[in-house]
Amino acid sequence: GENVEQHPSTLSVQEGDSAVIKCTYSDSASNYFPWYKQELGKRPQLIIDIRSNVGEKKDQRIAVTLNKTAKHFSLHITETQPEDSAVYFCAASKPHPRSSNASKIIFGSGTRLSIQP
Amino acid sequence: DTEVTQTPKHLVMGMTNKKSLKCEQHMGHRAMYWYKQKAKKPPELMFVYSYEKLSINESVPSRFSPECPNSSLLNLHLHALQPEDSALYLCASSQELGTASEQYFGPGTRLTVT
């Protein structure tokens, strides 16, 4: 089945520096890669996503890259701010094995990002 | 309205109780989901509904019973739960069921089974 590996599990960076979180997936049928930010006690919030026909996408301080050949995708946060502190989950979506039209999102194990003032 | 809402926020129930979790969205999304999230773990898919019909049951024990009364509402009926079922239960919705359809999560119900 699909497996999504996420590294690192914890990341501490100085305010203003950049943070990079990396994920790998195993199933080449995966074609959609969302990233979620979850603050303590709150809902996972979709912050950016990328589809398999695109190599890079940027939204202000956040960018995501996808290497389909290597099955790698990464989240880059520049000019980090204290409010960026949260757990970040990468995910890969693929057609569900038991349904002709449903999909299944497999989440990575999460990265706890701490921004030090 | 661009939100998924869930009630209650917190729920404590005994192992013999029957309770229900509720989820609502008014974004016109046709797919709705139940996830379970244990502490420090990612969400795990439980059920998927599409056009008010159950599409996927991820081998969830029968003590969890989903229901979709209409396109905006999703319920999760709970009966005879175990302490290990204590978790954050998240509802999500997406425009359609396809693989590239963005899922939006509700705030969750934090369930404690005593």
Image (cartoon, rainbow, N blue to C red):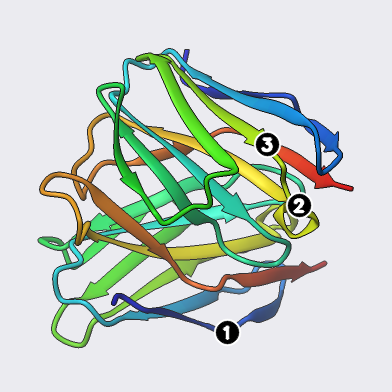
The chain under label 2 reads B
Q: Is residue A36 above or below residue B7?
A: below
What is the C-alpha distance between the residues marked 1 and 2? 27 Å
Label 2 sits on residue:
B86
| Disc 2 packing (10 Å; few <14; some 14–19; many ≥20) | many
Residue A79 seen in render: no
Q: Chain of mark 1?
A: A
Which of the two discs, 3 and 2, sits closer to the camera? Answer: 3
Q: Position of residue B85 (x, y in %)?
A: 71, 53
Q: Residue at x 76, y 41 (%)?
A: B110
Residue furthest bottom as drawn: A70
Residue B30 visible in rendering:
yes
Which residue type does callout 3 highlight?
His
Q: Earlier in the sequence, mark 3 or mark 2?
A: 3
Q: Is residue A117 above or below residue B61?
A: below
Residue designated by label 3: B79
Q: Nearer the viewer, mark 1 or mark 2?
A: 2
Question: Horizontal and vertical percent for residue B40?
Answer: 70, 67
Kindly report the distance in space between the C-alpha atoms of the residues bearing marks 1 and 3. 38 Å
Q: Amino acid at mark 1?
A: Pro
Residue A8 - label: 1
